[in-house]
Amino acid sequence: MGAAIEDPPMAAGATRKSRDTDSAPYVLEDQIGHLLRRAHQRHTAIFAAGMAAANLTPTQYAALVKIRDLGQVTQNRLGRLTAMDPATVQGVVNRLLARTLVERRADPANKRRKILTLTAAGKKLVRAAIPHGRSISEETLSPLDETERKALLDLLGRLT
């Protein structure tokens, strides 16, 4: 269970009454976390519809694209590159292995390390899925003009 939320400390000499009346109102709809969550929900719905035929989740898609980009990669590095924790990347890789979209083999230089590569079926699927990925991004960003899109992507990149 998480820690209890406490009132933030007050400035020296402040009283609870003055603090409550002096502060600006807190409007949920203006908060970054709320807006990011809403944007993420919208994008997730667009992604699910756009990738329905490929039957890929966002994390599976990211893994396939990154393996395609690199040709081969360790599971640990794949997790770092796609911002997945070890348990998540393990589950994603296991599902891709079960679908025979990737294969895992021992690294000749270090038998404990496993190397991931795309199978022929994985290459074919990712090649077919990437145009859908582009369409999904386009639809997600459709309310914005080109300048706003670039600014949003630049700003989000700075937050990560």
Image: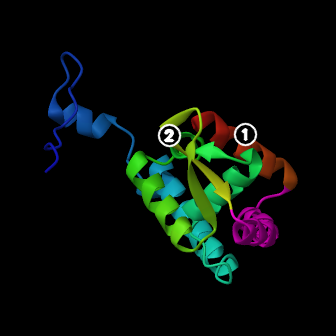
Query: Label 1 is placed on what type of residue?
Result: Asp
Identify the mark nearer the N-term, 1 or 2. Answer: 2
Circle 1: element type? helix
Q: Residue at x 78, y 71 (%)?
A: 124
Q: Residue at x 72, y 72 (%)?
A: 121
Q: CA distance from mark 1 to mark 2?
A: 35 Å
| Left or right: residue 144 compared with residue 48 | right
Residue 133 drawn above or below residue 24: below
Q: Total marks drawn?
A: 2
Q: Specify start and end residues of the magenta stretch as a single range.
A: 119-145
Circle 2: element type? strand
Q: Which mark is residue 154?
A: 1
Closer mark to the observer between disc 1 and disc 2 = 2
Quarter the C terminus occupies: top right
Picture coordinates of residue 4, whole percent (x, y) = 13, 44
In terms of depth relative to the viewer, which is nearer, 6 or 59?
A: 59
Q: Residue at x 66, y 59 (%)?
A: 64
Helix, strand or loop for the magenta stretch, by majority: helix
Reading the image, the residue beneath label 2 is 113
Picture coordinates of residue 88, whole percent (x, y) = 43, 55
Picture coordinates of residue 115, whole percent (x, y) = 59, 46
In terms of depth relative to the viewer, which is nearer, 99 or 13?
A: 99
Question: Mark 2 packing: few (<14 Cα in 10 Å), some, or many (20+)?
Answer: some
Residue 47 drawn above or below residue 77: below
Q: Residue at x 49, y 48 (%)?
A: 84
In terms of depth relative to the viewer, which is nearer, 95 or 7?
A: 95
